[in-house]
Image (tube, rainbow, N blue to C red):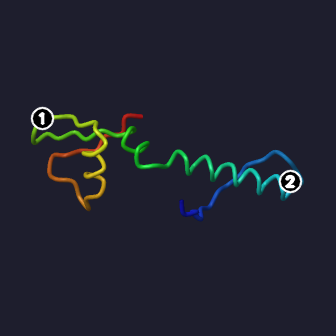
Amino acid sequence: MKKLKRDLILLRKEDRPNELSIAHEVACINQLLQSVETDSSLCNAHELIDLNRYKILQDTISISKALKLKELKPFQFLFNRN
């Protein structure tokens, strides 16, 4: 998987932090975020409400198709279940 460059803010209580421990913490956080930020976990956290057909779609295929569109069709809503 391609490594992403991201900005992270670490809040620590230490006055003089060790550079090695900070680098280890950032690497662990990046690994954790890469395992969580997947398409399947995004589809599991959302559902598609389609008022045209009066259905609530929770399957991965329908939600991933809706996410790939630039705009949703009229009266379709992407709802976060969290």
User: Residue 17's mark?
Assistant: 2
Q: Which of 45 and 65 is in front in this view?
A: 65
Question: Would you name the residue on which mark 1 appears?
Answer: 54
Q: Considering only vertical position in the picture, is 79 above or below 34?
A: above
Q: How many labels does the image show?
A: 2
User: Residue 34's mark?
Assistant: none
Q: Which of 3 and 52 is in front in this view?
A: 3
- Residue at image point 30% right, 53% down: 67
Mark 1, secondary structure of its residue = loop
Left or right relative to 42: residue 21: right
- Residue at image point 10% right, 39% down: 53
Q: How many other residues sit within 10 Å of disc 1, few (<14), some (14-19) or many (≥20)?
A: few
Location of the N terminus (image quadrant): bottom right
Left or right relative to 11: residue 63: left
Which residue ends up furthest to the left in the rendered image?
52
Question: Which quadrant of the view contains residue 9?
Answer: bottom right
Question: Which quadrant of the view contains residue 62?
Answer: top left
Q: Considering only vertical position in the picture, is 62 above or below 22?
A: above
Q: Distance between the residues labelled 2 and 1?
A: 56 Å
Percent position of residue 54, x then y = 12, 35
- Residue at image point 25% right, 59% down: 69
For badge 1, the amino acid type reads: Tyr
- Residue at image point 30% right, 50% down: 64
For badge 2, the amino acid type reads: Pro
Percent position of residue 52, x then y = 10, 42
Which residue ends up furthest to the front in the rendered image?
1
Percent position of residue 31, x then y = 63, 50
Q: Which of marks 2 and 1 is nearer the N terminus?
A: 2
Percent position of residue 65, x then y = 26, 52
Left or right relative to 41: residue 46: left
Location of the C terminus (image quadrant): top left
Question: Which quadrant of the view contains residue 2?
Answer: bottom right
